[in-house]
Structures are given as structure tokens and as C-alpha cells.
Image: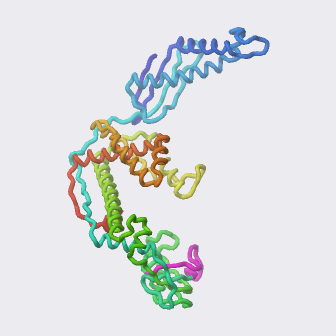
Amino acid sequence: MMVSVESAEGLERRMRVQVPADRIESEVASRLESVGRTAKIKGFRPGKVPKKVIVQRYGAQVRQEVIGEIMQSTYFEALTQEKLRPAGGPRIEPNNTSEGEDLDYTAVFEVYPELEVLGLDSLSITRPQVEIGDSDLDDMIERLRRQRATWEVADKAAEDGDRITVDFHGTIDGEPFSGGQGEEVPIVIGRGGMLDDFEEGLRGMSAGDEKSVSVAFPESYGATELAGKTAVFAVKARQVEVERLPELDDDFAKSFAVEDGSIDSLRKEVADNMRREADQVIRGRLRDSAFRGVLEANPDVELPEVLVEEEIRSLRQDAARRMGGGEDAELPPREPFEEEGRRRVALGLLVGEIIRAAGIDLDQARVRQRLEAIAAGSGQPEATMKMYAEHRQLMAQIENQVLEEQVVDWLLEKASVTDQSVAFSELMESN
């Protein structure tokens, strides 16, 4: 087998492969002989069909199958011989497939770039440090109380913290607009569910009151057709309700499945959950900072376009699914996803090279710990463990996450890390 490789534009390679004719003809003859032993052709007994008839009936099909299979096998043989790492599947260009002549074809593909990850010793990362104090815990307990709150109709004017149910009809320059109408819409004043102007207009209204409320939409408003415009809403209040929070007692604790039903135990469980949430956010911050630093230190990574296109398509498919589209849904335009697609491919190549150069092996103990944690949190640990054991793709996701964490740990050892105290609320709000 003769192989020659030419470099085309960028990472593209044109690999010409020539396979001796006798390898093709030998395999074709062997296949036809096998077919002849089992072929059923009218007028002949099985195994007694003349070779000429077998060739006439099956020769073209068998030759086509053999050529396809030998192209595939010799393609991989040639890659190994030339020490090439293709980034995607090849485009095959047949040059000669004539009977009795050497098979000659060209495989066109992109290869992975040769990389050297730079700037790792100059990485600078800020690591948030969070102390969960009593005030943080109190705020979280209050949030839990609000989740279990009830509402009681009150004969009063609405103020901050009250829930007012209203009908409204909005117009701009006297004309109604899409989304400007609603009936029996509950709004908790001061919670930011509506624009400030609208909520301000609801303050002081009692059940049965009617009034006009002028609302200025900000220039940055999401609905561009309303941005910067002023609407007038005709509002009618149907009822006003006050919030009743549950008492902090054993019944409240038991409603969160606290085993001994005590408030002290509830506070401990809540604090533990807050610490886990904070650790997860901090871990994500460190990951983002480390990987951003790697990308900034290596801005000129040459990217295989085949990988970029695959990543962009994946992002577009994810976006279509989030918008409620099925498998056959039309994908959104390509352009908004190109920058992120290129960033992800570049990061993937750099992380892959770090793993290779640093000799980072997957920590199976961490994989097991991650899997056990997922199973424990699922409520059906045995079924969850079985599901992951039977689905290689799910296990691969966990393995990739653990390997990524190992890379972050390795980068943090190389980087200059500065600890910075951050309030729990600030950490979670900026997440």
C-alpha cells in the first residue's frame, strides 16, 4: 500500500492511498466463491452454479462492497502509518476503482493541531471565601417560611408585601398592545414582579378601586417594540391579601422532613445545604476563572472547522429544544452561536492537551463518589446506580465532569490564587 500526504489550507490534509490490485481481486474472488456455495439460482442446484453465472449475477455488487470495505480499512491503516489524528470523518474522492487496476483514492480531512499550552504559571485566580453566619441562615429560614406562606383576604389598602389581584388594560397612544391586558393577575407589591411604575400605582389601592397608571418602559426593555415608550393602564383592584407566615415550630420543621422535628435540626440541615450550594458555586467560579485564564493565555489556537461546525450545530439544537422545538424543529440562525462554538472547541483542545501533557488519569474513586452522591439524592439509589451502569453515555458524562475537575485542581496548583471574603447572599446573587 502506498500513501502520500499533502497539506492543504489550515489543518486540512489530502491523503492519497493506493492499494495493489491483487488485494482487491483476491478478496472479490474469495467473496464470490463463498456466494457460489449458497446462491440459489433457478435451473442450478445449490453449490453447482457455474462461476461465470455467479460473476455475472453478483460480481458488480461484491466488487463494490469489497472496494468500500477496503477503502475504510486502508484509510485507518494509512492514518496509523502516517501518525495522523483526524478531527472528523474524511471526504473520500475515488481516483481509480477499475477492475484489475490498483485501487486509488484520496481522503480529505482535518487534523488536530499541534499544541503547546502556554502561560499556565502566570495564571491569577481569585477564590471566594464564604462564611455562613447567623444572619445568612435567618434569611434562608425566612425564605423557607415564605415558600409555605398563606394569603388572607384583608379589607385594607395595598402596601409593600401585600398581594393585590387586578384586571388591567394597557394602551400606547390610545392603542392596545400585545401583552398589555390581564384579568385576575396576582401581584405581590415590592417583589419586583412588575415594572416599578406599575407597582407604585398599585400601592394604596383597595378592593373595588379603579385608576389609571402611567408606566414608562425602559430603553433596555426586552420587548423592543415597547422599549422607551410610555403606556397607560386602566387598572381595577379585585382583592387585597396579606401574607401569613407559618410559625417557627416543630410542625414547620417536620414539613421539611427533619427527622426529630426540631427547629435546631432544621437550621443545621439548612446550613449544611447552604454550604453545599456555596461550595458548588465557588467550584464553578474557579473552573470558569481557570479556563478563562487558559484561553486568554492561548488566543491563537488553530481550530479544525469540522469541530467548530459540530459544536455550533449542537448549540443551535440545544437552543431549539429550550424553545420547545422537537427533533424536526427548525434551528435558529448560526451566527449568534459561532463565537461560543469556537470558544468551546478551543477550550476542549487546550484541556485535552493539558490532560495529555500532565499525564492526568481519570480518578475512578471520585467517579464512584460522584455517582453515589447522585444516587443518594435521587431517592432511588439502587435504580439510579443500575441506570448509570447500563448507559455508557450517562457514565461518560460523569467521567468527563470528574476529569474536568481534576484539570481545574491541577491548574490551581500552578496558578497564583488569592482568597477573597464574600457574603453568602452576594455569592448566590451574582451566580
Q: Quadrant of the C terminus?
A: bottom left
Write the residue at 57% across / 55% down. 325
Is residue 312 in sight in this rendering?
Answer: no
Identify which residue is drawn at 70% across, 14% down. Answer: 56
- Colour scheme of the picture: rainbow
Q: Nearer the viewer, residue 234 or 93?
A: 234
> Is 11 above or below relative to 253?
above
Task: Look at the image and give the residue range highlighted in magenta.
Answer: 167-189
Location of residue 415 in the rendering, given as x and y in whole percent from the top left corner: 22, 49
Number of marks present in the image shown: 0
Q: In the figure, 149 relative to 305: above or below?
A: below
Please tell me whether residue 422 is drawn above or below residue 414 in the rendered image.
Answer: below
Q: Nearer the viewer, residue 414 or 154?
A: 154
Q: Main secondary structure of the magenta part?
A: strand
Q: Residue furthest right?
A: 43
185 drawn magenta: yes
Residue 76 locus on image (x, y percent): 46, 25
Picture coordinates of residue 362 (x, y %)?
34, 39
**Could you tell me residue 160's position as x and y percent?**
42, 83
Q: Nearer the viewer, residue 223 or 319?
A: 319
Q: Does the rendering let one see residue 266?
A: yes
Q: Within the image, what quadrant is residue 237 found in?
A: bottom right
